[in-house]
């Protein structure tokens, strides 16, 4: 962010990726404890797939928009 700035394409892509991936730990910690799930393997896989989709979508959308 110091080199390219927050309004650059790279800054926007990075910010979007950070926003979409921070929910992984939230999903695993909160939802599994509320429901009482002990084995988080499938939740972790689903969250990581969601992270990957969010990263790809961020790059594609910001390349289209700018």
Image (cartoon, rainbow, N blue to C red):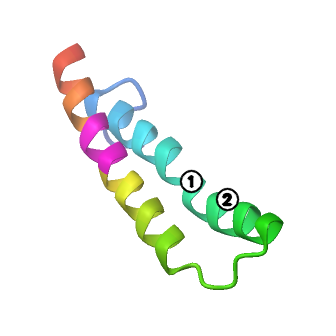
Residue 16 makes an appearance in the image:
yes
Locate residue 39 relative to residue 17 in the image: left or right: right
User: Residue 64: where, in percent of width, then height?
Assistant: 17, 19
Label 1 CA crowd tier, 10 Å (few <14, some 14–19, many 20+): few
Residue at 31% from the left image edge and 54% from the top image edge: 52
* Residue at the far top in the pictured view: 65
Residue at 43% from the left image edge and 62% from the top image edge: 46
Residue 66 makes an appearance in the image:
no
Q: Quadrant of residue 35?
A: bottom right
Check if mark 1's residue and mark 2's residue have beta carbons within 8 Å: yes
Label 2 CA crowd tier, 10 Å (few <14, some 14–19, many 20+): few
Dominant SS in magenta: helix
Give the answer, above or below, for where 56 lies relative to 36. above
Q: Nearer the viewer, mark 1 or mark 2?
A: 2
Give the answer, above or below, for where 48 lies relative to 8. below
User: Residue 17: where, in percent of width, then height?
Assistant: 40, 45
Image: magenta residue range: 53-58
In the rendered image, which quarter contains the C terminus? top left
Alpha-carbon span between mark 1 and mark 2: 7 Å
Element type at marker 2? helix
Q: Which mark is residue 26?
A: 2
* Residue at the far right in the pictured view: 34
Is 6 in front, or is 12? 12
Residue at 40% from the left image edge and 63% from the top image edge: 48
Give the answer, above or below, for where 2 lies relative to 36. above
Locate residue 1 relative to residue 53 in the image: left or right: right
Residue at 53% from the left image edge and 68% from the top image edge: 43
Q: Which mark is residue 22?
A: 1
């Amino acid at each position: 962010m110091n080199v390219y700035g927050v309004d650059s394409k790279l800054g926007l892509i990075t910010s979007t990726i950070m926003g979409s991936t921070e929910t992984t730990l939230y999903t695993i910690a909160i939802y599994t404890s509320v429901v009482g799930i002990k084995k988080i393997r499938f939740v972790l896989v689903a969250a990581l797939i969601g992270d990957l989709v969010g990263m790809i979508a961020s790059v594609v959308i910001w390349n289209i928009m700018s």
